[in-house]
Image (cartoon, rainbow, N blue to C red):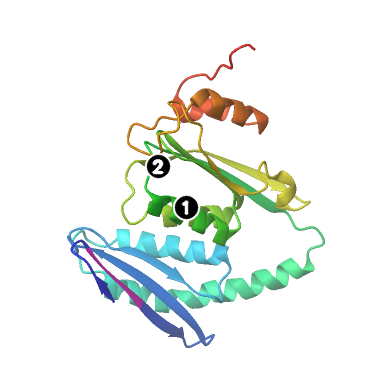
Amino acid sequence: MSFSCCRIHFLYVSVCSVFKVKVELQVLLPHTYPHVAPQLFARSDALHRQQQLQLNTGLTSHINSLDPGELCVYEAVLWVKDNCPPYLENRKASSESASEEAVVKETLQRMWIYSHHIYRQGLRKKIFDCAKKLGLTGFCLTGKPGVICVEGPLESCEEFWHVIRYPNWKHISCKHVEKIETEGGIDNARLFHAFNDLQFQAHGDYGLRNDYHMDLGQFLEFLKQHQSENVFQILFGVEGKLSDK
């Protein structure tokens, strides 16, 4: 368990008696708990990402149904213990069903994320480490404004979005989501082959600082090269126009 002036973070580990597997519940308590609900995330190596996502959606829905200000950590532990078996059973049934299917369809998700700025080295490291861990491709446009694009399996993108937002990234929003269904493997639908660090300097090489604006003209050209120039208006609210050369 770790303590700070703002929050308490601990991990509860339970063993599902039916399937004999370990389930972890990560709990992050804000300093205003129980007036502000805790951040909860349940995971197990025995669950596929889709089952894990469904489990956490159900947990969040249950906690939100409780009375505001109610102590809910113990309630969350009980809910996870009681509700894990159906998800584990669904995982078994899904695996058996998938093995019988001749054609497997996969969905690639592409998320376009906007931030007022991205400067801090620690935050940039977190973004790149998370993308690498989840096998996502795309880019991070560092500076002001900041833009992140990630693409890969739907569940991996959703986990990336969950991880980078918490505990306290406020000036960030997901502006656009694309879902592409494919039968030939999601790699064929990717626009990017790696996760890259983009820096289009508008005011010379001054290093990352609070007035470090990006050259959006260069960024628009980059989007055009990757068949995504339409996203420019979605991100910034203005139509992008390339200058004639």
Residue at 78%, 51% in the rendered image: 184
Specify start and end residues of the magenta stretch as a single range: 7-11
Callouts 2 and 1 close, C-beta under 8 Å: yes
The earlier-in-sequence mark between 2 and 1 is 2
Residue 127 is tagged as 1
Quadrant of image for the N terminus: bottom left
Instruction: In this rendered view, identify the residue nearer to me: 39 or 60.
Output: 39
Q: Could you tell me residue 172's position as x and y percent?
A: 38, 42
Residue 118 is tagged as 2
**SS at circle 1:** helix
Residue farthest along the top direction in this orientation: 244
Q: Residue 42's image quarter?
A: bottom left
CA gap between label 2 and label 1 equals 10 Å
**Image check: 111 left or right of 56?**
right
Residue 179 higher or lower than 228, as above or below: below
Q: Could you tell me residue 97's position as x and y percent?
A: 72, 69
Q: Is residue 9 magenta?
A: yes
